[in-house]
Amino acid sequence: MAGSLHATGNPEADQLLNNNALALMVGMLLDQQVAIEWAFASPLRLQARLGEKLTAAAIAARHEDAAQLRRRLLALPGFGREKTRIFIALLAKRFGIEPPGWEAEAGPFAAPGYSSVADLDRPDAIESLRAHRAALKAAGRDKTGRPTPMEPT
């Protein structure tokens, strides 16, 4: 793969994007979350944090506890508290990546049931998730089960 994208203002970051499909995909995922330059330079930052070539295997092989994983995810653009908790639950429930303390860090998304994408364990599970969310909404609760604030009338 060799492209000619110049999106970051950083030749090294652009080179990574043009020669690494995962880096390009990460940049695209972050695009529209933050400024273009920041989104597409993020794969180079991630590679620097890893201390090795950016590959899916390198990311998956990281051995860290769930609190450290939470801190690192929260440092990424587009990852707020809830998305981080869901992603930790997703890694544990669907991919068997269970760093110590993952249940506490995933919070309500660690529980069995259909509260997030982490619970999509079969092709028709999305319908169960949608039904669960509709029931919560009808009961005046958010997707974690907390009461939603009342809107002014």
Image (spheres, helix red, strand yellow):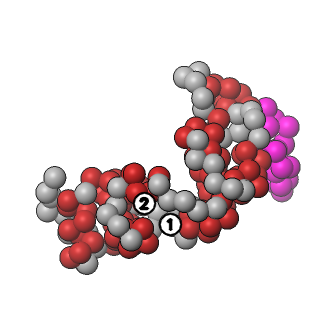
Quadrant in which residue 136 is drawn: top right
According to the picture, the residue beneath numbered tag 1 turns out to be 77
Assess whether residue 47 is covered by the magenta stretch: no
Decide if residue 100 is on the left or right side of residue 38. right
Label 2: few (<14), some or many (≥20) within 10 Å?
A: many
Amino acid at pointer 2 = Leu
Q: Is residue 28 visible?
A: no
Q: Marks 2 and 1, how far apart in space?
A: 7 Å
According to the picture, the residue beneath numbered tag 2 turns out to be 30
Where residue 110 is drawn, which disc sits there?
Answer: none
Specify start and end residues of the magenta stretch as a single range. Answer: 135-153
Assess whether residue 144 is covered by the magenta stretch: yes
Quadrant in which residue 34 is drawn: bottom left
Indicate the secondary structure of the residue bearing disc 2. helix
* Picture residue at 64% right of the left edge, 61% below the top: 65
Amino acid at pointer 1 = Pro
Residue 42 screen position, x and y as percent: 39, 69
Answer above or below: position of 90 versus 102.
above
Q: Are marks 2 and 1 in contact (CB under 8 Å)?
A: yes
